[in-house]
Image: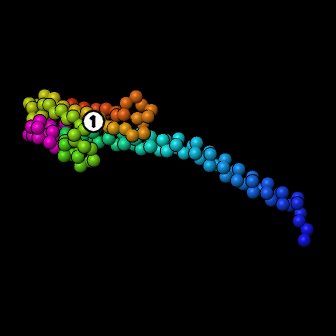
Amino acid sequence: MKLNLRSLTHSLKMVTCRWRQRGQSLAEFGLLAPVAILMIAGLIDVGRLAVSEHIIRAASREFAHLATVSDLSNAEIRTKVIQRIQSMGIDPNDVVITVTGANGAAGQPAQVTLNYRVELTALSFILPRDYIQLTASTVMFNE
C-alpha cells in the first residue's frame, strides 16, 4: 500500500482552510450581532413612540370634543381620559392630564392636554436621557 503524501497534505490544507473560514464567520458574526440587536431594539422603541403619540393625540381630540358637546365636568372628562388611555395600554400614572373649560358657555374654549413620559430602552444609549416627553393639546370651542 502506497501512501500518497501529496494527497494527504492537500486534504490537511482543505480541512485547515475550512476551519479558518468558520472562525472568520464566527468573528464577523460576533462583531455585527450587537449592532443588529441594537438596531432592532431601536426600531421597537421608535414604534412604541409612534403608537404612544397616536394614542395621546387621539385621546386629546376625542375628549376635547366631548368636553364641548356634553354636560360633563372637567373631573368627569379627566376620568374618561384615564379610562381610555388605560384601555389602550398606557399607564395613567405616567400621564399628566389637564382639562379646562368643559361644560362652559357657548363660544368658550375647552382644552384637553396630555403629557406622557415614554421610557426608552435601546435609544437611551444614543440619546442624552432615557425618556421622551410627548405632549398633545387640543382646544375646541363649546357649542
Front residue of this view, candidates 4 and 22: 4
The image quadrant of residue 43 is top left
User: In the shown orientation, is residue 24 left or right of residue 9?
Assistant: left
Q: Which x, y percent locates residue 122?
A: 42, 39
**Residue 24 magenta-highlighted:** no
Q: Amino acid at mark 1?
A: Tyr
Residue matched to label 1: 116
> Per the image, is 77 magenta?
yes
User: Looking at the figure, which quarter contains the N terminus?
Assistant: bottom right
Residue 96 locus on image (x, y percent): 21, 34
Residue 11 in view here: yes
Please state, as top left, top right, bottom left or bottom right, where the C terminus lies in the image: top left
Q: Residue furthest right?
A: 2
Residue 111 is left or right of residue 122, and the answer is left
Residue drawn at x 16%, y 29% as measured from the top left: 109
Q: Nearer the viewer, residue 108 or 13?
A: 13
**Which colour style is shown?**
rainbow
Residue 70 makes an appearance in the image: no
1 left or right of 44 in image: right
Quarter location, residue 53? top left
Residue positioned most to the bottom = 1
* SS class, disc 1: strand
Q: Position of residue 30 (x, y in %)?
A: 58, 45
Identified at 19% across, 39% down, the residue is: 63
The prevailing secondary structure element of the residues shown in magenta is: helix
Residue pictured at 18% horizontal, 32% vertical: 98
Per the rendered image, the range of residues in magenta is: 64-80
